[in-house]
Image: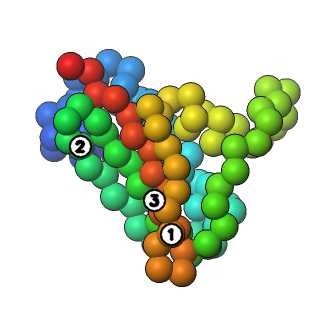
Amino acid sequence: MRRALTDWNLTGLTGHGEDAVLVAAELLSNAVEHAGGVRSMTLAHHHGVLQIAVTDPSPDRPRLREHRPDSVGGHGLFLVDHLAHHWGSRPSGRGKTVWADLDLPA
């Protein structure tokens, strides 16, 4: 994630870069913990939006659950939901791709 931001000259994102790293980490860890692993991660940026997409082998769509601040885990999609402008999932072969769009500063 950091390498892509550097390669795209997006390192001056002050805070946004760390948000992107956190969202990518959450999508990747969710794929590993709940969906059988990671098939791929795709990063793209266009028109002021950075899209992070993680594909996994499970067809089960992610569900945003009630957030419990006092729980030890279960904060991943809550964080993605709050940091991303939009997020969702779409079928991909026998699995799915979970994506998150983050606004880039002007």
Is residue 2 found left or right of 100 in the rendered image?
left
Q: Residues within 10 Å of mark 3 (few under 14, many from 20)?
A: many
In which image quadrant can residue 18 be found? top left
Asked which secondary structure carries label 3, the reply is strand
Is residue 16 found left or right of 59 in the rendered image?
left
Tag in front: 3 or 1: 1
What's the amino acid at mark 3? Answer: Val
Residue at 16% over, 40% down:
8
Residue 25 appearing in the image: no
Which is more toward the observer, 87 or 29? 87
Asked which secondary structure carries label 1, the reply is strand
Circle nearer the N terminus (2, 1): 2
**Mark 2 to mark 3 CA distance (whole Å):** 15 Å
Res. 91 mark:
1
Residue that numbered label 3 is attached to? 54
Residue at 41% over, 55% down:
53
Q: Do the residues bearing badges 2 and 3 touch, measured as CB atoms within 8 Å?
A: no
Q: Residues within 10 Å of mark 1 (few under 14, many from 20)?
A: some
Res. 40 mark:
none
In which image quadrant can residue 60 be found? bottom right
Asked which secondary structure carries label 2, the reply is strand
User: The C terminus is located in which quarter?
Assistant: top left
Residue that numbered label 2 is attached to? 45
